[in-house]
Image (cartoon, helix red, strand yellow):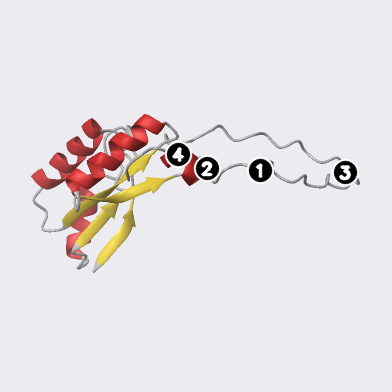
Amino acid sequence: MIDPHVHLRDWAQSDKETLAHGLMVARRSGITALFDMPNTNPPLTSREAVTRRLREANALASGVSYHIWAGVTGDTQQVREVAKLAEELYPSVIGLKFFAGHAVSLALAEPKPVAPLEAGRPAPAASPAPATKPAAETIFEGASV
């Protein structure tokens, strides 16, 4: 059985979960493979973080096949680098995870505050969004992925 969405955290978030504990629980539960999410601290968005994480997980020799989703940010150069890394390290890096909104350490932009509504006053009508390219076209423009 495969669990394709786990958060083993560790590092600066080891109070929430660790690689050793998560892999032990998976093995005891009959899980044969895990796909770990990249929103860790530090995030799994660079060659250094990804390779460190894979080394540490493999050193545990848990009997569970460990894989990660590499994180994609809004930085075009980072997208190119992590896409190349994912290609090089597949299947250890199972794919790329793009966060379209606010997520721990991987936010593309800060959320915009929403003005509170006054009591008894109707909400303003939404205006249409300006015509732009889809985010994927803009981010991956020129990248060979």
Earlier in the chain: of badge 1 and badge 2, it is 2
As drawn, is 80 to the left or to the right of 74?
Answer: left
Quadrant housing the N terminus: bottom left
Residue in view at x 12 percent, y 46 percent: 58
Earlier in the chain: of badge 3 and badge 2, it is 2
Q: Which residue is mark 4?
A: 139
> Whole-Å distance between the Cαs marked 3 and 1?
33 Å
Amino acid type at mark 3: Ala
Which secondary structure, mark 3?
loop
Q: Which residue is mark 3?
A: 119
For discs 2 and 4, the disc positioned in front in the rendered view? 4
> Whole-Å distance between the Cαs marked 1 and 2?
19 Å
Amino acid type at mark 1: Ala
Q: Residue 21 location, x and y as percent?
A: 22, 50
As drawn, is 74 to the left or to the right of 21?
Answer: right
Q: Are marks 3 and 1 in contact (CB under 8 Å)?
A: no
> Whole-Å distance between the Cαs marked 4 and 1?
16 Å
Q: Residue 14 location, x and y as percent?
A: 29, 38
